[in-house]
Amino acid sequence: MFSKKLKQLTPYTPGEQPQNRKYIKLNTNENPYPPSPEVKKYLDSVDTDTLKLYPDPGSQELRETIGNYFNLSSSMVFTGNGSDEVLSFCFYAFFDKDNGPLLFPEHSYSFYPVYCGFYDIPFKRIPMKSDLSISVDAYTVETDYSGIIFPNPNAPTGTYLETAEIEQFMKKVHSNRVVIIDEAYIDFGGKSAISLIDKFDNLLIVQTLSKSRSLAGLRVGFAMGNEILISALNTVKDSFNSYPLDKLAQNAAKLAIEDIDYFKENSSKIIKTREFTVKALKSMNWEVLPSMANFIFIRKKELSGKIVYETLKNKGLLVRYFGHKGIEDFVRVTIGKRKDMEFFLDLLNTTWGK
Ligand SMILES: *Cc1c(COP(=O)(O)O)cnc(C)c1O
């Protein structure tokens, strides 16, 4: 009854979305603020008659909006149903077992190995520095690979590489292998490497509206790069689903990208709350990795990550625990509103003190 391929799949485990009890959710890196009021205005006024028709298969207007925002032609932009789908198309288009393994950081986004399983792509996890930041040198010593992918800032660690470092790195890697930078968290203090796509035809930047534009529920992500790479993604899309973005998502995403002031204001509130939280945690003797994301990766001496996760869950607060070797003492905590972080800090303080 089932295919051989199905038996070989190992699916991704998303962060919990429990429905049984009300938790303070600091576990899936969602934005605590609502999306742009322009999105609400639009969705409140939708003429449902327009849904009789198929949407624009190429999301042309949305791609132009994204292009305008980044100063790119729309032919250098690809849109998809969340950046997870965009990434999945990238894996299909660019990586291949005939060309060697895909390289990614030892501790990184756990969807990457899942796509490798799905598309039968071998992979190699590249060791990180002892401070859990990405070591670019550890990639450039590799000679045989079909491509490279890493998030910047990295997830779940939050550490960040400067554009200058990425440029040096791009000069050293094979120019006939695609490098993908997954910038899901770039808007929380980092600077996009988008300026490098003119210099490197093999560089693809992927972003999402799920985190910094508060639209995880709308499912819109995009990739930017050389037209030849974008056209390869279109070939994959049109061989799989020509209408990945529905009409509402295309229009609402456009409005969200255009509302630059609102987006900047929210991102800077989150950055401020992050700085406040980090300072408080350090004063309570928690170790916090330097983060440029809307989450932090933390641990405390002599406490296991599992205990921290379970204790907080019992008290009504969710954080993300991975339990992978090397990071088993850490939990990842999403930056919520200031009052959520105060509640979180109080819980830590009353449970474990300084
Ligand atoms: C959240 C996240 C994504 C996926 O975002 P969607 O656009 O919601 O699919 C991709 N990469 C990383 C590293 C993420 O954390």
Image (cartoon, rainbow, N blue to C red):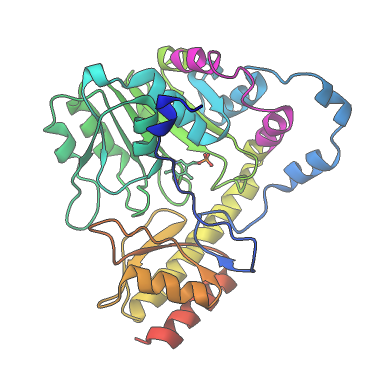
Tell me the quadrant of the picture where the C terminus can be found. Answer: bottom left
**138 with respect to 352 (left or right):** left
Choose top left, top right, bottom left or bottom right for residue 288.
bottom left
Horizontal side of 158 relative to 294 (left or right) equals left
Number of numbered discs present? 0
Q: Main secondary structure of the magenta part?
A: helix
Is 242 magenta? The answer is yes
In the displayed structure image, the side of residue 84 where residue 198 appears, left or right: left
- Residue that appears at 72% across and 31% down: 251
**Image spot of residue 316 (x, y percent):** 56, 74
Residue plotted at (79% across, 40% down)? 43
> In which quarter of the view is residue 136 placed?
top left
Q: Can see residue 153?
A: yes
Specify start and end residues of the magenta stretch as a single range.
Answer: 232-255
Q: Is residue 320 above or below residue 148?
A: below
* Left or right placement of residue 258 versus residue 176 in this view: right
